[in-house]
Image (tube, rainbow, N blue to C red):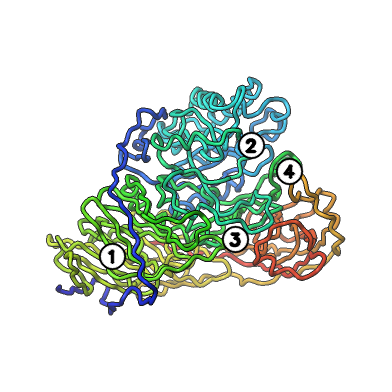
Amino acid sequence: MKKRAIRHGVAMVLVLALSSSPAAAELVTVDATKAALPPRSAHLHMGAGAGPHGTIGVNNRYLTRDRRPWLPVMGEFHFSRFPASGWEDEILKMKAAGVSIIATYVIWNQIEREPGQLDWTGDRDIRRFAELCAKHDMLLFVRPGPWAHAETRFGGIPDWVVSTTRPRSNDPAYLAEVERFWRGLAEQLKGELWKDGGPIVGLQIENEYNLDGESRGRAHIATLKALAVRLGFDVPLYTVTGWDQTIYPKGEVVPVQGGYPDEPWSAKLVKLPPKENYLFRFHSRVSGDLGAQTRAARGRGDADDDVDDTPFLGAEYGGGVPVMYRRRPLLSPADVGAAVTTQVGSGVNLLGYYMFHGGANPLAHGRSLEETQRSGGYNDVPAIGYDFQAPIGQYGEVNAVSGAIRPLHYLLESYGDRLATMIPHEPAVQPSGPADMSTLRWSVRSDGDAGFLFVNNHVRQYAMAPHGDVRFDVRLPSGKVRIPSTGVTIADGASFVWPVNLDLDGVRLVWATAQPVTRLRDEEGAIHVLLATQPGAVELAFAAAGIRSVSVPTKADAAGRLLAQVLPSTDRLITIEKLDSTKVRILLLDAGSAKRIWVGDVGGTRRLVLTDADLFFSGKALVLRQRGEPHFRFSTWPLASDVSANAEITRRGTAMEASVAGPPAGSIAITSTRAPGEAPPIEIGGPAKAAMQPLPESHRADAVWSFIVPQSALRDVEDAYLEIDYRGDIGRVSDGTTMLDDAFWDGRVWRIGLKRFAARLGHPWSIAIMPLRADAPIYLDERARALLPKAAQVAELRSIRLVPEYELRVTLR
């Protein structure tokens, strides 16, 4: 083959074996010839799908947008749990992470804090939130309960409604209260529905509903939907949650599914058995216990029998998990990334997260509204803190888990229209159950001869057997494909997606040992970005037909395919020239780049940005932010020729660097003002018959320190964070008698953003730490346990650091 120079320079390409593992060869097989059910939609009674911005529809297999298959990413963000002044940036952060639909609970008792007074102002102004979503081309899925759960008091239903009616039933008194609440919501959202040109594409009816009997059951869900329609909620999608034996009127709503990497609502004090969310699903879409607060008498929910008539949609795949009083699990980024990759490989056609963005519970006249066992809930959660270990945290900070899931989101954004029509196929040999750590977990989703191969070899808190010299036999309608040409090693912790017969603008990529990420375009044509899934060389296999040349060394196999083993590079393109002289380019990134990938539109051009900074896109600008580090490094594809910023830019090849001015990180002086008392024994009881959060008077045992955050803390920076390193049970930060935030200690450094408290800086604050008893019947991750001293109790404040968040705004022209 003739080797051609590449526009951005030629680098050495090494031809390497993909694996030199001495382990016995492992050949695994799947029959992917089964055809999917034909799409049909007349049986699903949804609302208006057409609007000024196009059409949105649903059939028994997938969602559609403008009559094309559509596989979006949806992320939960509660507008009333975040200051309205910051909504716009947070929406842009979610968009930059590959989210295209924002889901939000409308939490009733956060809107109606006094009987009969619905307050839609300030941080409760859902209309403004919807308008900001529309401004930035983000869709909105409204979840108005009336029972939401959301770790709130009475599931969000106001106290006076709970005490005077029969909630979650067709009790006329209850329905009258719901109608009053929903009517107020409908008035706020008038004109914001999809049919009117607005962003609202869906409505979820109730939540985790499995109650049956008089005035309940399917009839109640039907009544709520009819009420919503009568009030004007005419939307393309009506959904209900589909787990924990849910019941609903078939055809009137579509079930959505979920699954979490841990169960913080569990009363168990030990590491849980392996979660089924790390297995591929071929026979049921319904995950195990997701924590519904009611228990159905019947053993099988309606969603189990609705598989052929509804698509596999998700709404609550855990972007994290909350920290609850009795159980405080810590997640790693891979815990989330592996779980959602597995669910997409199982056929999910809407990847919905709960939560994608953390928040803070508002207080109602100083009274907290969180869920507690003492108020009849099943869980105890912090009064304010609702960080959820989410991809975007309580204060808008981008957490490490974001980097583990963004590449998958960008794949769905660029290739989801193809993946949506593909059905999952079960390999010949599958694990015997969640506890089987030795059998390879994998799946193929395909439609005809095109597909994607999914692998997951990660299970949270458990070691998986590595697999050496693995090859995959995939039987397609046109014949068998063996992938790759030589075996690969699949290490413990690996999870990835490989393409099978992927059309790259007229070039057929038969396989790649790399995950597709996104499709870009410049003046020379298409650029497809792939991400290596292991160290070393990547094998690319092209169908030779229609190809004139490839810019890297290739060899032909017996089937006439062109095989290349290529080392990834962030500054080199692989060019394939077709017989018609047009070109397709591939940017092949190394596996370590995964957490540095960002994709979005800048001034109408879709760009890939590689940076360690947090990032979002705003018009023609890249907005990069970093905590504690004022020096920024980044690169873009397509390459930007004209760049300006709020700091001097230095170019180093394809990379750019800049340093911004601002104060350095430093320590905050602390003064002990009260020694700890003896913490009382933790009470066992409540609905969970487990450790209950201590009563308010128990905080007399708190150790207390005072400190002052200087008024200058926010000068010349985007934000600043307190990083509190402490040991204890419960931490509370207060300004006088006003609590600003609280947390249950879980081993992490507690981070508090200061921008929302700007008016309170410069005078004394306090931090109170309730001692953690050595005999506390509380589950802590082993990493947290290792940090505790051997003592009868501990209440210790080690340090408070002030860490600036610096911002670099880069304009590309």
Is 534 or 4 nearer to us in this picture?
534
- Amino acid type of the residue tagged 4 in the rendering: Gln
Mark 4 / mark 2, whichever is N-terminal: 2
Q: Position of residue 475 (x, y in %)?
A: 27, 55
Gap between marks 1 and 2 measured at Cα: 51 Å
Q: Amino acid at mark 1?
A: Ile
Of 264 and 439, nearer the camera is 439
> Where 712 falls versus 684 (above or below)?
below
> Marks 4 and 2, Cα distance to the nearest angstrom?
14 Å
Residue at disc 3, secondary structure? strand
Report, in whole angstroms, how far the alpha carbon at label 1 lies from the one at label 4: 55 Å
Identify residue for label 2.
Answer: 294
Badge number at residue 719: 3
Residue wearing tag 4: 373
Residue 586 numbered mark, or none: 1
Residue 157, given in percent of the width and then of the height, sits at 66, 34
